[in-house]
Image: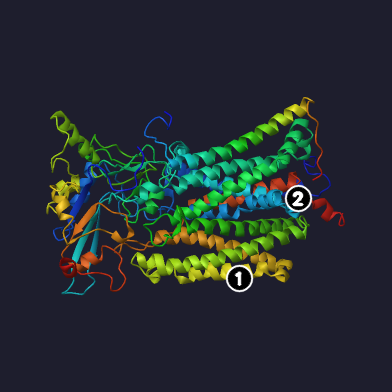
Amino acid sequence: MFPFVFEWQWSADHYIFLGLLYLALLIIGVGVHVVAIKTVLQILGILRERHFDH
Amino acid sequence: MEKKHGPAKGNSYGMVIDLDKCTGCGTCMVACAAENNLAVRPDESDKQRSITWMRLYKVTNGKDFPYTEVSYFPRPCMHCDHHTPCVSVCPATATETDPHTGIVSQIYTRCIGCRYCMAACPYHARTFNWWDGYFPKGKGIERYLSPEVSPRMRGVVEKCTFCHHRLMRAKTQAYTEDRRELEEGEYITACTEACPAQAITFGDLKNPEHKVSRLAKSPYAFRLLERLGTEPKVYYLSTKDWVRKLGDNYLPGEFKPVSTVKAG
Amino acid sequence: MDSALIPEGVKRCSPKVFFFWTLPWIALLLWGAVSAALCLLVGLNQTNMSDYFAFAVWIVVDLAIIALGAGAFFTGFLTYIIGKKELKDIINAAVIIGFICYSGAVAMLGIDIGQPIRGWFIFWHVNVHSMLAEVSFCITCYLGVLAIEYLPIILENREIKKVRTLRLAGENLHGIMAVFAATGAFLSFFHQGSLGGLFGVMYARPFDIRGGFYVWPWTFFLFILSAMAAGPSFTILCTKLTEKIARKHLVPEKAFQTLAKISGSLLCFYVVLKIIDTLVWVFGNVPRAGLSFMDFFKEGPYGVWLLVLEILVFGVVPAIILITPSARKSEGWLITGCLMNCIGIVLNRFTFTIVSLAIPVMPFDKFVSYLPTWQEWGVSVAVIGYGFLLFSLSYRYLPIFPKERELNAATK
């Protein structure tokens, strides 16, 4: 069912491509989670709100 | 299986087509269509969208009567060996060059129909199912449909498979007879079998006993678009220089006639 | 009627006028919807694509809008990573334009492939050596990044901002925008390049083959450069168009000038490299395949004029316009330069797609011609309708231009 089960053989190309891809996805994922957690903590009053001038 | 971009290990099935024998009758096209369950269309006149795995091209030497000469190029899939253009570009791994047989396969159920392989193939060996498969009832078509070849759905790419199902059939037969090697002629494609002029020879290019491997080394043998480096496994034989010249692009002065090839 | 949704301190037209404004764009979208439905239900035979023209007008439009939408990543890169503060006044517009371009391209691709439901196979059964796999991955991820960059702009809507959670989420997103801009730039670099790589790796097509660096053909780098050059120009054009239709200044001149200058410099650099690449191809790659350059144009309507148009008329000329300060400062010349820049890039994408497929490779093969059907046009123009609609809605209800109030205070 998973593509890694059959006919898949790891090679250097796979490591580079998928490595970079997952790194990019990780950064995006972490960023979104940080924002979500920060927002929740601010709502709960644990963190202070920051004020921006645009 | 890790894709190896290089010459096939094991067998290397290929074809030699003698253009001096080819009469342009088109039986190879019909046999291929019948063998491989090719879908038809109510109106087949749009040749750019009708499905055909083997295609016959008519060529002439461009001279006026009485010096006109005509020849035909039957063109199946070349099953390119080196860095197969279509295989390297498919994003979904729906096509692969089998290192054991040299056959370039197509997984119809995995193909997403992006058609990148079609753009990459210089031989236009690949066709696309622009319509749903049409097998009209009551016309006798169901009598020749083969249960060994899966029909294709709309939106996928298909191409000549060197009648891979016949290889499976031959291997199964050999296994039951406790053999692992196939004899010459046990596995041949439908077009090879059907050609009335016996212009097509099919076999293992790597096996020196197979006729194909000897014919491929003939001084009259050439391949289509050899200079591009695709390493096709379909060879053509012709004693006529003007036919051989049509096999590739040549700048003025680059083409070497057969006489110089023989001597050299 | 909807005045509560309109940003504070700015004027927008009445809801009735806005409704009439949206009608032509909705009509285009409807045309596209009917075309798309036909293609999905009946099949791709609704188009004029054939076994020779595997790629056609949709791919040209896809490549063109992705190149033009590069303004989003590049402006983001310049704003958040390089630190050009004046571009903060235009970055929101650039992000929205980018989002429109990329979401439109992805939607169009969904119609273009023969089995759209299997589209996810590119991710599941990936062939990492294929340029198209690289394109799909990066475009999908980048669309996600664009959505994340668009979100804080939406959350700044007057009514939405009243909900504390949403306001905080928007502010926090805005705070780490540099991270997304950097990731977006990285992803964009690769997919803009692989779109060029798509053609450069087709070594069996002499019209497309190029040399390269390791696995990357020169077209890879040329496409990135041309996208970076054209993207900011397209952003300028769209913003200027918005200013003309809204009849007010929205962005300070400095932002336009910065973008135009960078666009012009990159275009100069690109044109020089493109000319070198073309010459190397004409005198190196093409003869090695046994062809001469003029062999490509033996039949059919395409000729050397197309390359002259693409590289000289719509390449060198806009480059000169955009790097000349006096021309840049004149609005007429600025718009002309940006428009010609964008047209040149579209011609480049067209040449690689349509012309390369029309030209035969085998000596006994024929030149083929192609014209799109109304269904193909429908799906293509639907992106324009979608773009106008989404941008209009964003302009009306979201504060996308930070300096709008300041620039229009005198006229109020």
Residue identified by numbered label 1: C317
Q: How is the image coloured?
A: rainbow
Residue identified by numbered label 2: C401
Query: In the rendered view of the protein, which quadrant contains the C terminus of chain B?
Result: bottom left
Please give the name of the residue rendered at 80% of the width and 42% of the height, measured from the top-left corner: C3
From the top left corner, tell me how far across and down residue B14 is, in percent.
Answer: 22, 49
The Cα atoms of the two marked residues, 1 and 2, are separated by 31 Å
Label of residue B228 in the image? none
Please give the name of the residue rendered at 69% of the width and 42% of the height, measured from the top-left corner: C177
Residue A24 higher or lower than C296, as above or below? above
Number of other residues with Cα within 10 Å of mark 1, as a class: few under 14, some 14 to 19, many 20 or more: some
Q: Nearer the viewer, residue C284 or C100?
A: C284
Circle 1: residue type: Val
Residue C374, visible in the rendered structure: no
C289 with respect to B198 (left or right)? right
Q: Chain of mark 2?
A: C
C366 with respect to C407 (left or right)? left
**SS state under label 2:** loop
